[in-house]
Image (cartoon, helix red, strand yellow):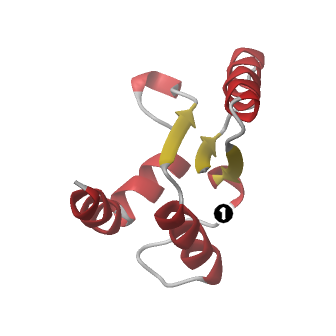
């Protein structure tokens, strides 16, 4: 089984520790964890890219997605927001097809 871990600006110590705990628990359960650092991806406006195609295919092959984001100024990080806004239709249609 595979789970995708989407990370957006998780450089703070408490977020690093939380991510480590989640990864350790999933690995103890013999679940493969695939980390994706959204902060390193270029911002995009619906432009097709190899990185996004790879991420979306990894998500479609996985059994779950865990999203972790820094929350500056009471809003999610821009990398996570961009990822979810641009890909919301693909993710939503995938989730609906799994129900």
Foreground pick, 29 / 81 = 29
Q: Residue at x 45, y 35 (%)?
A: 76
Mark 1 crowd level (few <14, some 14–19, many ≥20, 10 Å Cα): few
Figure check: 2 above or below 97? above
Residue on which disc 1 sits: 41
Total marks placed? 1
Q: Residue at x 31, y 64 (%)?
A: 94
Q: Quadrant of residue 68?
A: top right
The answer to whether residue 78 is left or right of residue 29 is left
SS category of the residue bearing label 1? loop
Q: Where does the image place residue 63, in percent across and percent down from the top left?
A: 49, 51
Figure check: 14 above or below 60? above
The answer to whether residue 20 is left or right of residue 68 is right
Q: Residue at x 70, y 46 (%)?
A: 33
The answer to whether residue 16 is left or right of residue 82 is right
The answer to whether residue 28 is left or right of residue 88 is right
Figure check: 18 above or below 55? above
Which quarter of the figure is the C terminus placed in?
bottom left
Foreground pick, 25 / 81 = 25
Q: Where does the image place residue 48, in percent across and percent down from the top left?
A: 50, 85
Q: Where does the image place residue 55, in percent across and percent down from the top left?
A: 58, 67
Q: Quadrant of residue 17?
A: top right
Q: Where does the image place residue 59, in percent across and percent down from the top left?
A: 51, 61
Q: Quadrant of residue 97?
A: bottom left
Task: Residue lying at the far top in this picture: please name it.
Answer: 14
Foreground pick, 52 / 23 = 23
Q: Residue at x 67, y 32 (%)?
A: 26
């Amino acid at each position: 089984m595979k789970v995708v871990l989407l990370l957006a600006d998780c450089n703070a110590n408490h977020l690093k520790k939380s991510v480590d705990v989640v990864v350790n628990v999933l690995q103890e359960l013999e679940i493969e964890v695939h980390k994706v650092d959204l902060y390193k991806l270029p911002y995009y406006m619906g432009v097709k890219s190899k990185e996004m195609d790879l991420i979306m295919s990894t998500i479609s092959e996985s059994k779950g997605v865990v999203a972790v984001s820094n929350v500056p100024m009471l809003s999610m990080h821009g990398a996570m927001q961009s990822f979810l806004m641009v890909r919301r239709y693909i993710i939503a249609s995938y989730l609906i097809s799994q129900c």
